[in-house]
Image (cartoon, grey):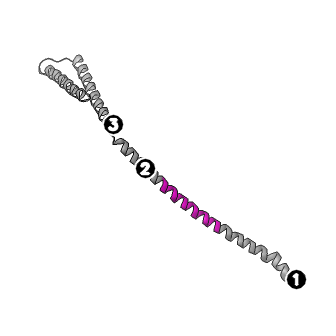
Amino acid sequence: MEVQVFISTWLVPVGATLLSIWFAVSAKRDSDKSAQTLNQVNEAIQGWQSQIMQSTASILDSTPQVIEAKVRLEKVGAARAIIQSMQTAIEISASDPKGGASGHTQVEQLKEMGNQLSKILEHME
């Protein structure tokens, strides 16, 4: 009878406690492995999606319409820069007009900028 009491009061509770600890450790290990596998799958999916998005963006950027629009924007930017330079030169000439060679240089610079602007505008069509 003492053996049954010993088993029921000490051996079974201690065994159950040890078994529950083993299950908890095993569950934690399995959970960590699952989380690691899930992270690897997630990274693989994100990498794959990123490559598709980059390829799609590259394809769209290489279409003739996009390239033409980019070239047109650059031409507009160049024309805008020439116009701003002309405005600055005109303002300087108006505030400090010079005669002789200096005046001739100012006029020639404005004519050259006008010619460059005309060439850009002709090629924009």
Provide the residue designation for mark 1. 1
Q: Which tag, 3 or 2, sits closer to the chain's start?
A: 2
Of the residues shown, which amino acid type is indicated by label 2? Ile
Separation of residues labelled 1 and 2 (CA atoms): 74 Å
Q: Residues within 10 Å of mark 2 (few under 14, many from 20)?
A: few
Which numbered disc covers residue 52? 2
Mark 1 or 3: the one toward you: 3
Residue at image mark 3: 65
Residue 78 horizontal/vertical position (percent): 27, 31
The residue under the point 29% across, 35% down is 71
Q: Is 63 located above or below residue 122 in the figure?
A: below
Label 3 and label 2: CA atoms lie apart by 21 Å
Three-letter code for the amino acid on which mark 1 is drawn: Met
Mark 1 Cα-neighbour bin, 10 Å: few <14, some 14–19, many ≥20: few
Residue at figure coordinates x 85%, y 79% from the top left: 5
Q: Earlier in the sequence, mark 1 or mark 3?
A: 1
Q: Nearer the viewer, residue 20 or 103?
A: 20
